[in-house]
Amino acid sequence: MDGAQALVKCLEREGVEYIWGLSGGAAIPIFDALVTTKTKIKLVLVRHEQGATHMADGYARATGKPGVVLVTSGPGATNTITGIMTAHMDSVPMIVLTGQTISSMLGKDAFQEADVFGLTMPVVKHSYLVHKTNDIPRIVKEAFYITNTGRPGPVLIDLPKDISSGAFSGELDPEMDLPGYKPEKEVQVKDVVAIAEALKKAKRPVLLAGHGALISRAAPAVIKLAETLKAPVTTTLLGKGVIPETHPLSLGMLGMHGTAYANKAMVECDLIMSIGSRYDDRIIGHAPSFCRDAVRIHIDIDEAEINKMVNVHHACVGDARLVIEELLRHVGELETKEWLAHLDGYKKKYPLKYRKQGGLKMQHILDELFKMTDGKIVVATDVGQHQMWSAQFSKTVRPDDWLSSGGAGTMGYGFPAAIGAQFGR
C-alpha cells in the first residue's frame, strides 16, 4: 500500500462521501488511489479548482460535514485560495488536499511548485506539509478533528508526490498529537447566571442570531428561548434560518440591507444579546454608537470575538447551543407585550416592498417562489444586489437552507455552492 491509498482509506474512516477536484501531475497518485482502492468515495470532477472549493463549501453548509477538495500543485493549489478564504471567513469546515512537487525539490523553483502552505496561512484554521508517508493517517485524523470542532474552518494538507507515492507501513488509526488544541469550552454557569439576571431586568430585549447558532445546531434552543422570554429575534445574513422568518417573533435580517423594523429595534432596545454573531461592520455600522444605551451581551465559541468590535457588559464563551440550553434553566417570560406591539407597528409601517409597475421584478419572482414552495427550498446566492434582494424577499424557514458568501463576499460562489448542497441533500 502506498501513501495515497492509505490517504483514501483514512478519508473513508472519516465518513467522506464526495471529493471535489481537478487532477494534475503532482496529485495523480491520489486520483489513482481513488480507483485502485475500490473506495465508495465519489469523485466530482470540476472545471476549475475554485469551483471545487465552493462545491465543498456548499456541501458543508448544507450538511454540517466537512467538504473535501483535491487539486494538484502550483496554479491548481493557488486557484483554491479564494474558496479557502470564503470558507475561513464564514467558519465552514473544509479539508483541502493539494499535490506538491517532490520533497527534494522544495524551495528550488521546481515545475508547478508553490508555497501553498505559506500562501494560505492567513486563511486556514490549520495547515500541514507532510514530510513522512507514515504520518498521513495521523494528519488526516487531526485535520478532520480541527476543521469541525470549536470554531470550524478550512484545513490544508500539502502532499509532495514522493510522499503520496511512497510505501506506507504505519497505523491507519494512530493517536492524535494536538497537546495545545482545546476546542471544547466548558460553559461557565456564573456567566450564564449574570446574563439571566440582565435579561430579567430588560423591557425591550432583542436577540441577534448569527451563523454560529446554525453551526452549533442551536436553532431549536434559540426559538425556545425567544418564545420563553417573549423576545424578538433578528439575524445576520448568515444567520437566516435560525428562526423561521415567518415566525411572529422574527424581525428578519439586521444591518445595512436588513429590515427597517430590525434596525429600529436596535436603536430602541434596552438589551441586545448576540448568539453566534461576530458583530460585523455591516451589522453594527459605527461601533461606538451601536446600542449605546443598551445592555450588550455576547455569546460566542471564539473568545477572540468578545469585545473585538463591540464592548459588551456580559459575555459567555462556549458552544451556542449549550449556553442557551443552560440559560433556559435560569429565565422565564419577560414583560414585553408593549415592546412587541410597538415593533409590530413598525412592521406594518415599514414593510419590505417594491414597485410592481415597469415589468417583471426579481423581488416578485422571489415572493412567488417562496409561496409556491412554502419556503422549503435551499437558496444559494452569488454576491451583489441580487444577494440582498434574495436575503430580503426569499424568506428562510429552516436551518441550513440559506447559502451565501458573507464575510468574503465572493462572486462566483452561488452556483457551485448549490451543486455541493444538492450532493449533500
Image: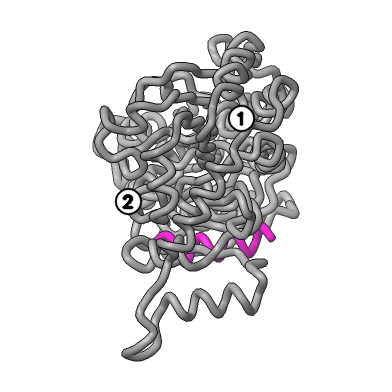
Most distant residue in the front direction: 338
In this view, the residue in front, 195 or 89, is 195
Residue found at x 46% / y 28%: 126
Quarter residue 424 falls in: bottom right
Q: Residues within 10 Å of mark 2 (few under 14, many from 20)?
A: some
| Sequence order check, earlier mark of 2 and 1 | 2
302 over 384 or under it: above or below:
above
Which portion, as a residue range, is magenta?
413-425
Q: How many marks?
A: 2
Measured as percent of width and height from the top left, residue 266 is found at: 40, 40
Residue at numbered disc 1: 320
Q: Is residue 74 magenta?
A: no
Residue at numbered disc 2: 256
Amino acid of disc 2: Met
User: Could you tell me if residue 48 is visible in this image?
Assistant: yes
Quarter residue 42 falls in: bottom right
Most distant residue in the bottom direction: 359
Measured as percent of width and height from the top left, residue 153 is found at: 50, 35
User: Could you tell me if residue 73 is visible in this image?
Assistant: no
Mark 2: secondary structure: loop
Coloration mode: one colour
The residues bearing labels 2 and 1 have C-alpha atoms spaced at a distance of 25 Å
92 over 47 or under it: above or below:
above
Select label 2 or label 1 by which is in front.
Answer: 2
Residue found at x 33% / y 28%: 292
In this view, the residue in front, 77 or 306, is 306
Q: Main secondary structure of the magenta part?
A: helix
